[in-house]
Amino acid sequence: MYFIFLLFWILLNGKLNLEIFLFGVCISLAVYLFCCRFLGYSPKKDLIFARISLYALGYAFLLIAEIVKANIGVLKEIYTEKTEVEPCVVKFTSPFESEVLNVILADSITLTPGTITVELSGREFTVHCLDKSMSEDLDRSSFVTLLQKIDHCINAS
C-alpha cells in the first residue's frame, strides 16, 4: 500500500525530481502509518493482497488459455467428420463456501466454449457440456485448483 501511495503521489505531480520524490516518500509514509494506526490496516494485509493479486493475474491468463483451448476443441467437434456429438448435463458440488468464488467458477465455465453453467444453487453446479469429453473432471479443473489457492489466502487472513 505504501508503494501505491508513493506512485499515486508521483502521478499526481506529473513530473519527478529528487525533491518531489523525497517529499512523496515522507507523505506516503505518513498516510501509510495513519492507515495502519487508525484504519486497522497492516503490512500482513499488504502481503495477502499481493498474493491474491498474483493468483488473480494467473487466473486471468489461465482463463484466456482455457478459452482458446476450448475454442479449438469446439472447432474440431464441428469440422471433423466424427460420430455424433454426445451432449450431457453434469452436476457437481463446489469446494468453496464463498458465494463470490462459486460465481467466478460458474462464469469461468460459461465463458469457456462448449460448456455453460445452467444452474448454480448454493454450492451445487449444473453444467451443460457440448460433448461428454468436455465434462470430465469439472470439479477438479485447473480453475478450481487456482481458486482454492485464492480461497486459502483469503481465509488465512
Image (spheres, rainbow, N blue to C red):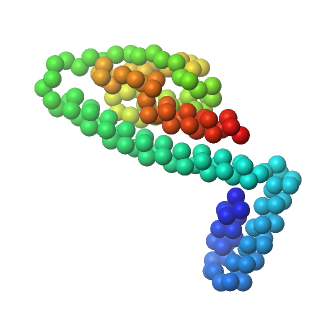
- The residue depicted at 81 percent of the width and 55 percent of the height is 36
Q: Position of residue 110 (x, y in %)?
A: 43, 31
Q: Is residue 14 above or below residue 30?
A: below
Q: Position of residue 45 (x, y in %)?
A: 71, 48
Q: Is residue 155 above or below residue 43?
A: above
Q: Position of residue 46 (x, y in %)?
A: 69, 52
Is residue 30 shown left or right of residue 20?
A: right
**Residue 117 seen anywhere in this rendered image of the structure:** no
Split into 4 quadrants, where in the image is the N terminus?
A: bottom right
Q: Position of residue 92 (x, y in %)?
A: 48, 17
Q: Is residue 91 above or below residue 17?
A: above
From this viewpoint, which residue is outermost toward the left? 81
Is residue 38 shown left or right of residue 136?
A: right
Total of numbered circles in the picture?
Answer: 0
- The residue depicted at 63 percent of the width and 29 percent of the height is 98
**Residue 75 seen anywhere in this rendered image of the structure:** yes
Is residue 134 shown left or right of residue 127?
A: left
- The residue depicted at 49 percent of the width and 33 percent of the height is 145
- The residue depicted at 46 percent of the width and 34 percent of the height is 143
Split into 4 quadrants, where in the image is the C terminus?
A: top right
* Relative depth, front residue between 46 and 109: 46
| Quarter of the rendering containing residue 22 | bottom right
| Quarter of the rendering containing residue 78 | top left
